[in-house]
Structures are given as C-alpha cells and as structure tokens.
C-alpha cells in the first residue's frame, strides 16, 4: 500500500493527545484487550529510546484497541522494571483500563514528539504482531498494517515508550 496508506493514516500518525479518546469517539464501545503484560527483552531501538543499559529487566505491555469489537490499533509499551516501584507504579494494576488514564490528566507527565515509523514487512516486530493478532482475533492482520508511531512519556525521570501500530482500516476515519 506504501505511500497511499501513509497518506491515509497521516492524520492519525500525527494526532496529538489521547489516541484512546479519539478512537472512543468512532463508535459505541471502546475496549482495551490486554494481550500481554510481562517482563521481556526489549528491542534495541526501545533500549535506545529509553536510554537503558544492556542489563536490567523491562516490563512490556501489549494491547489491542478495539472499537465496537473491531481491532484498529496494536500498541506496545515498554519501561524499565524499576519504574514500576516508582513513577509508573500504577501500570501494575492497570489491566483493561487504557494507559491514557495515567498520562493525560497528570501534569507531571511530559510526552516527546510523535515519530512515525514504517515497520519492515518481514521484521521481528511485524512477525510478533502477526502471532499476537492471530491469537487474539482468529485471523491474520492486514499485510498492509505497517505504519506506526512512537513516543516517550516521562514522569519523575522515568520513561515509558509507547509504540502504536495502525490498521489500514483506520484511514477511513478522521481522528
Ligand atoms: C497512550 C495512550 O494509551 C493507549 C492505550 C494503551 C494501553 O492501554 O496499553 C497503549 C497505547 C495507547 O494507544 C493513548 O490513548 O494516547
């Protein structure tokens, strides 16, 4: 889909503020389906974004955001496990509440700029998404699901990196 999907998703890739709130306006029912929230190795670009040393455990939360049952966004949030004892402790009990609840109402949270990124068609993240998406929905994600955006939220010196990957179908909606 290439340029076409980037153009179609451009407004979503750049939309400021809460993605959850924008999605919730698209239908009757907005849901966060938690696919995984556990310690796992970070990818090199995540380490880089969080300024983490090679060692040290990290917590990764992966979710599907659904509107009226339709999965529209896959999101992966990562932070150093030590932050769970500190500024990001509320993440531990978050469950199916949107991460946004911890971010936008808290003036101590500062967000970096949004960085759009096209996934490699056969890269590690894309393969991981395919496995999770298939297990969560019963069918594979669109082969065109390649456009994502990244940002880092900082609170009390602890960073939380969020990657959001958009389903091409989102392009028919305005954010
Ligand atoms: C950061 C936000 O939270 C959304 C919800 C997430 C979650 O619950 O894990 C992860 C990424 C976001 O798409 C947002 O709504 O802007």
Image (cartoon, rainbow, N blue to C red):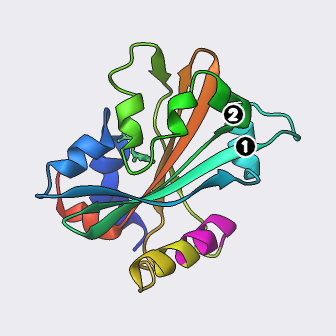
- Residue 16, given in percent of the width and then of the height, sits at 32, 34
Q: Quadrant of residue 74?
A: bottom left
- Residue 86, given in percent of the width and then of the height, sits at 63, 22
Give the residue drawn at x 35%, y 65%: 5
Towards the viewer: 43 or 147? 43
**Dots 2 and 1: beta carbons under 8 Å?**
yes
Give the residue drawn at x 64%, y 76%: 122
Residue 37 highlighted magenta (yes or no): no
**Residue 73 seen in the figure:** yes
- Residue 151, given in percent of the width and then of the height, sits at 51, 37
From the viewer's perspective, is 57 left or right of 131?
Answer: right
**Above/below status of 67 relative to 155:** below
In the image, farthest residue toward the bottom: 139
What is the number of the mark on residue 58?
Answer: 1
Residue 127 highlighted magenta (yes or no): yes
**Residue 175 seen in the figure:** no
Tell me the chief SS of the magenta region: helix
What stretch of residues is rendered in magenta?
A: 123-130
Whether label 1 lies within 8 Å of ligand 1 gets the answer no
């Amino acid at each position: 889909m290439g340029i076409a999907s980037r153009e179609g998703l451009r407004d979503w890739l750049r939309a400021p503020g809460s993605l959850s709130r924008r999605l919730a306006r698209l239908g009757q029912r907005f849901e966060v389906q938690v696919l995984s929230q556990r310690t796992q190795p970070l990818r090199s670009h995540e380490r880089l974004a969080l300024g983490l040393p090679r060692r040290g455990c990290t917590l990764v939360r992966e979710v599907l955001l659904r509107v009226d049952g339709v999965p529209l966004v896959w999101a992966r949030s990562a932070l150093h496990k030590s932050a769970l004892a500190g500024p990001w402790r509320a993440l531990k009990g978050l469950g199916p509440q949107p991460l946004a609840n911890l971010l936008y109402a808290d003036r101590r949270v500062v967000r970096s700029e949004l960085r759009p990124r096209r996934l490699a068609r056969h890269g590690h993240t894309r393969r991981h998404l395919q496995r999770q998406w298939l297990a969560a929905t019963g069918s594979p994600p669109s082969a065109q699901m390649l456009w994502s955006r990244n940002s880092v939220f900082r609170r009390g010196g602890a960073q939380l990196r969020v990657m959001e990957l958009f389903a091409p179908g989102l392009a028919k909606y305005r954010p």
